[in-house]
Amino acid sequence: MRKINLSYIANRRNELNKTLQDLADALGFKNASTYMKYEKGDYAFKADHLPILAREINCSIDDLFFEKNFADLAKYDEQSATSA
């Protein structure tokens, strides 16, 4: 499973001068503190949040995730070693 890059989301929001409340409104949350809990990792973003979030911070959905997770890298390394 790919992991969401929460620091990327926070950095993009700040780069675009969007407030926590701006993103809370876009995602249908009642207040900024609820959104902040998602951005800090206390709550997990849902799949239906991702397209909205990507649109709001002007990026692709893939940009919201870390490049590769460690399990994928380990699997790739194993495959490379056996095919060499």
Image (tube, rainbow, N blue to C red):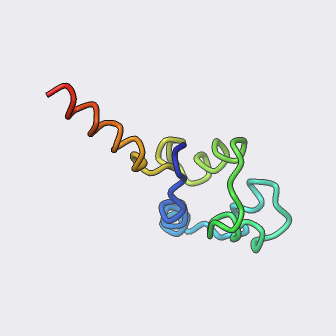
Query: Which image quarter: residue 13?
Result: bottom right
Residue lying furthest right: 30
Query: Which image quarter: residue 39?
Result: bottom right
Give the residue displayed 70% in from the left and 47% down from the top: 49
Residue 37: percent from left, percent from top: 71, 69
Residue lying furthest top: 83
Left or right relative to 77: residue 59: right
Give the residue displayed 82% in from the left and 55% down from the top: 28
* Residue 50 drawn above or below residue 9: above
Residue lying furthest left: 84
**Foreground residue, 17 or 10?**
10
**Which part of the image, by quadrant, shows the C terminus?**
top left
**Foreground residue, 16 or 75?**
75
Residue 10: percent from left, percent from top: 54, 66
**Foreground residue, 75 or 51?**
75
Left or right relative to 70: residue 50: right
**Which part of the image, by quadrant, shows the N terminus?**
top right
Left or right relative to 46: residue 61: left
Give the residue displayed 58% in from the left and 47% down from the top: 54
